[in-house]
Structure formats: C-alpha cells, structure tokens
Amino acid sequence: MNDLCTDIGYISLAKYGEQLCGDHVDIIHKDDGTTVVVLADGLGSGVKACILSTLTSKIISSMINNGMSIEECNATIAATLPVCSERQLAYSTFTVFHSLLQSEEVEIIQFDNPFVILLREGEFFEFPKTKIEIQEKIIYCSRIPVQEGDIFILMSDGAVHAGVGKILNFGWKREDIIQYMKPLSVVGYTAKTLTRILIDECSRLYEEKPRDDTTVCTIRIRKREPMNLLIGPPSNKDDDIKMMSLFFSKAGKHIICGGTTAKIASEYLQKPVIPSFNYIDPAIPPVGHIEGVDLVTEGVITINRVLQYAQNYLTDNDFFADWNFKKDAASLISCMLFEEATDINFFVGKAVNPAHQNPDLPITFSIKMQLIDELVLCLEQMGKRIKVSYF
Amino acid sequence: MIIVICIGSSCHLKGAQRVVEKLQMLVIENQLENKVILNGSFCMGNCTKGVCVQIGEMIYSVSPESVETFFQNEVLHAVQR
Ligand code: FES
C-alpha cells in the first residue's frame, strides 16, 4: 500500500537590502513517488551566499536522488564549492528531506540548520537522530516512519532569529515556532499555506525588514487524491462512449468542462444537464449539474481563468483569497486541482467545435489546446502527477 | 411559458449574463413570476446568432441592448393573450 505522498511549500525572504536570497530550496520528484528536498543556507548574504546555497542544494539533491550516500555528497560539495576570498571558507548549511514513501519512511539529514520540527496529530514529535562526523562536520541523520498528516518544518536560521533585539529580546526560539504552528497544523492547511503563515509571522517580527535570509519549507504527508478532468468532445464522434467510459471508470472526483462535452456526458449517464443562473462572478459562466459528476462548468473561458490562477499560484499567489473562498466555476476547479488533487488525469477531446470557429470570437481550437498545455505545465510545477490523454 | 437562455461560451462572451439579468428583472417588474420560467442551457449550436434565446421551437438572437424589445414583442404579447 503506497498511497501517501508529500505536499511541499516553501518561501524565502531575502535579507533586507539584498536582491538575492542566500538560502536555496531544491526539490526533485521522482516518478516512483520519492522526493528529495534540500534546504541550504550559504555563508554570508547576497550573491556569494546565493551561489553557495544553490550549488549545495543542487548537488545534494541530485546525488541523493541517484542513490549516493551523504559522505559522497559531502566530499563533492567540499571539492566543488568556491572558497570565499574574505573568509577562506566554503560553507553552506543544509537540511535534506528524503521521502521513501514506498516504505512509508523519511530520511532526514541535517547540518547546521535549526533542527527540523515534526508535528504529529497536533503535537510536537521528537524523533531520534544519529550524530556522525564527516570531515569535521557534525551531521545528524534520522530515518523515521511517517503517517498521514505529519508536518515537517524545515528552516534556515533567519526564521529562528526573527525579532532579535527588536520586538523580542532574543528572537523567537524554535520552541516558540513549535507552539505557534501546533494549533495550525491540525486545521488542514496545505503546505504552501502553512509556510505562508509562518513566514508572515517571521516577517512581522522583523518589522518587514529581515535581518537575515529567512526560509521556511513545510512538508505535509498526505494521501494521494486522484482527480479527473474532461474537456472537449472527441475528434471522432464514434469515440464518445470510449472516452466517457474511460473517464468515468477512473477513481476520484470528476470534473467536466464545456457545454457540448457536458451534453455527451449527460447522454452517456442518461441524466439531464441542469444549468444554473448563479453568476457569482459575472465574467465566469455559472456551473451546471449532472448527477454523478462532481462539477460541470463551461469550457474555455473558465479554464482560461483557472490558468491565470495557476500562474499566479506559482508566483506571488496573491489571488489565493479569491479562488480559495469564492464559489464560481473557475475558483471551484482551482481548489480541486491545486489543493485537493495530487494526481490529475486530463481527458482532452480534440474535436474542433464549429461553434467556436466564429471569427468574431476570441476562442479558437488552438487556443484551447494551448490553455491546457500551459495549465498542465503549471500543475506539474506544483508537484502534481499529471496524465493527459487525447481523443 | 419557458424561456431558455444559452449560457455557452460564445453566448457568454456576447453578454448572456446581462441578458439573463435583464430578463429576470423584466419578469419581476411585470409580475410574471408565475407565468414565465427562465432556464439556462449550454451551447445551442447556433453560436453565430448569440445570445440565443429559445421559446418553444423558436430560437431568437438577443443582445443585452435588444432584450427589452424582445421581451415586449415576444413575451408580453404571448402571455397577455
Ligand atoms: S454558445 Fe450559445 S449557441 Fe453556442
């Protein structure tokens, strides 16, 4: 039974006055479901620190991903990192999170960052660490079984120093972060949201002027959640039934986008399509309803909005409050795809809708295909496993 | 009387939402809530003529600007008879 996966979110703040952040997070997802996350904090700040941490995190993540040991990683880093001319040092801290979800375990390797926090069922959970010494570096290794709902918080030291000498005398300690995050860990927030909450608090303690590069990376262990989205009628009318039966045989929720597509589904299921006039957002056509389908929406206009939300999600995510709370079709799809789903099957019909080839209207077949391609790309960047089938 | 308004993609872009809103208003203003039912439909296959509004077998092409005239001619007439 391997139905666990990781939901990862991270945010970095650069030290006040610096353009570049000296912390770096690198993530590798493998097809077999294993994930490697490395958070590195380079010595100093600005460009130098950024180079050190980027190199360190990239080297470690790809080496661990290829099955190499931490000793080998360390040797490579030592041989590769450029030595700082001022300090005669090549140095970057790192925290490695390696999920081996086949065995429902994770491996954690820590060097000089604040210790990883594990919250389990709303409580702080202390996990055993083995101390090893490699080339004068003290490294802590752990291997722990995980369960659904576990939340791991990786940080750079900027997070624990937040507020030093300003709002708080000694900054907030790791213990304070634990207390702060404990009640939030059971609400069901995604990793991205938890990260945002914690980083916002750090930023507030720094009075919006971080005195050190600050990075938080949250990893939530969750169940895989399949989702299926059908858009467009098949190019060959004879494939209607084939497409529908494949779509409806899939586990997970089912979303249908497009009026014509909804009609085909309604014939297949022998249930009527019931449209509504509920214009929550005047720009987005209202949702419809077919018994046996979780969500029925219009096609291109709605997906176009979903794509805008997806692109925004990957950058500053300031539309989050819109789609997370509103109930229009595009917001509903966004919640289902970005938050609920971990594995998404797209069923894309390539029929050219004669209705849409009207020169007055900005919808063409190629635009629809392009929208889907771009959306798939965004979802992959969110760490979703995507399969697209064309009909 | 049942009036079906297309809310498909093309008709949406041509202002289906405003047509729906205006029709809803007109029905209330004329106190026809018991006589006229407004329904939505996905694409009626007549996009070039959007916004498509169907009464019985007839499909009319209505724009947000022409809703009132349409309502006078096709709806009020028919129900008042
Ligand atoms: S969208 Fe209204 S007829 Fe096609």
Image (cartoon, rainbow, N blue to C red):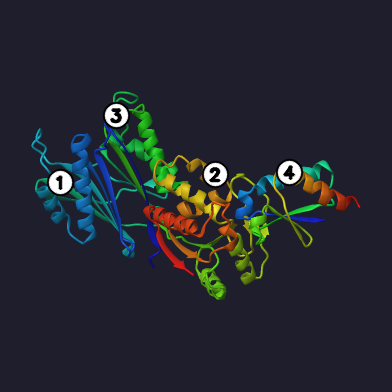
Name the residue: 84% across, 44% down. Answer: B31
Name which residue type carries label 3. Tyr
Q: CA distance from mark 1 to mark 2?
A: 46 Å
Label 1 sits on residue: A138
Q: CA distance from mark 2 to mark 4?
A: 28 Å
When the figure is inspected, residue A218 is found, relative to residue A72, above or below; the finding is above
Which is in the foreground here, disc 2 or disc 4? 4
Corner quadrant of residue A73: bottom left
Q: CA distance from mark 3 to mark 2?
A: 33 Å
Q: Secondary structure at mark 4?
A: helix
Q: Which mark is residue B22?
A: 4
B43 to the left or right of A192? right
Tell me which chain the residue with mark 2 is part of: A
In the rendered structure, are the residues bearing label 1 and label 2 in contact, judged by CB atoms less than 8 Å apart? no
When the figure is inspected, residue A293 is found, relative to residue B70, above or below; the finding is below
B23 to the left or right of A144? right
Mark 2 Cα-neighbour bin, 10 Å: few <14, some 14–19, many ≥20? few
Mark 3 CB near ligand 1 (8 Å cut)? no
Q: Which mark is residue A16?
A: 3
Which is in the foreground here, disc 1 or disc 3? 3
Mark 4 Cα-neighbour bin, 10 Å: few <14, some 14–19, many ≥20? some
Q: CA distance from mark 4 to mark 3?
A: 54 Å
Q: Earlier in the sequence, mark 3 or mark 2?
A: 3
